[in-house]
Amino acid sequence: MWHSTVECIVTLALSLLVMAPHTAMAQPSKIHRLGFLWNASPSLTYHWLEAFRQGLRERGYVEGTDLTIEHRYAEGNPALLPGLAAELVGLKVEVIVTSGSQAIQAVKHATSTIPVVMAVSGDPVETGFVTNFARPGENLTGLSLFAPELSGKRLELLKEAVPAISHIAVLANPANPVTAAQMRETQRAAQALQVQVHLVEVRGPDDLDNAFSAIRRMRADALMLLLEPMFISQRARLVELTATSRLPAMYSFREDAEAGTLMAYGPSFPDMFRRAATYVDKILKGAKPADLPVEQPMKFELVINLKTAQALGLAMPPTFLFQADEVIR
């Protein structure tokens, strides 16, 4: 009986050894493949990509182990976006992440089946990317920074920082679908503050020099920018033109103030890219983009560049500086 028991144990052990490799081979660890379409260059988007990677790590993904990311950069040339979007579709990635109206439009035209996560979008309903915020309805979902009331808030903050201003030039692209709503909020705030705002149209990078010439001719004493993807890719040039014109200016994002403009107020891009990873995680686990509501900004930042204020000869009110999330000295 003892020999019989031993034989059974040996037989069972051998069976397990034979079965183990087959069990492991039957359940391989899948490496997900993502696509990322960028309108700008790697140097401009590095911090946003790092925030996205952080979001992935927070959800247990290790790049190179659990997933790989195929990047395509338009380097600020929108004409390249359709071709780059088609490349990502051709690679049969599982999810495409992108930001900005032009890049989102390119991906939307390239595929109606691959899930698309908008890390940053304007008004996705107005632009026709989704049916509504609660139920996007198609293969796109993600985050929207569109909140037209922010334009009025930016004007209020600019006036509070520099009380003497009365004629503000507002730089905007009239072809951008969200410009009209932003301008309405800006004019509403201007009326309450008893200041005048003058719309200066910019449809492309080639218009910037003429736009600033017009601003100088109208003798504007301050500048504000409305949301426009082109302004991100042209940040360095815009900040330089603003400095040359010696204008106190309100831009939209932390990165603008860090680049040298007087101040910026708006959503945190890194926070939005980090949150975009949540959408990717849900989609990889089986969720449909059509069922994932589009979210709006949760974190806003007021950043003031005190070096620029000093260069302009401005004494910022201490109470205003106290409001800032960061003061660059």
Image (cartoon, grey):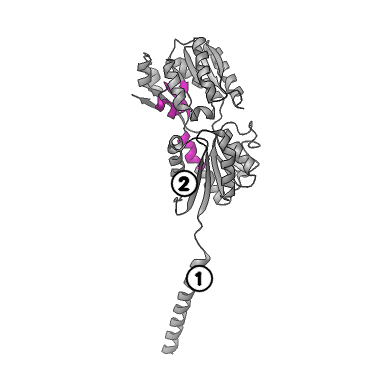
Q: Could you say which disc has been placed on residue 56 in the image? A: 2
Q: CA distance from mark 1 to mark 2?
A: 31 Å
Q: Is residue 193 above or below residue 70?
A: above
Q: Earlier in the sequence, mark 1 or mark 2?
A: 1
Which residue occupies 49% across, 37% down? 272
Image quarter where the N terminus lies is bottom left
Left or right of 246: which side holds 297? right
Q: Secondary structure at mark 2?
A: helix
Q: Could you say which disc has been placed on residue 245 in the image? A: none
Left or right of 303: which side holds 118? right
273, 150: nearer the viewer: 273
Left or right of 141: which side holds 319? left
Residue interval drawn in magenta: 250-276
- Label 2: few (<14), some (14–19) or many (≥20) C-alpha neighbours in 10 Å: many
Tell me residue 14's x, y (percent): 45, 79
Question: Residue under circle 1?
Answer: 22
Q: Is any atom of residue 25 visible in this view?
A: yes
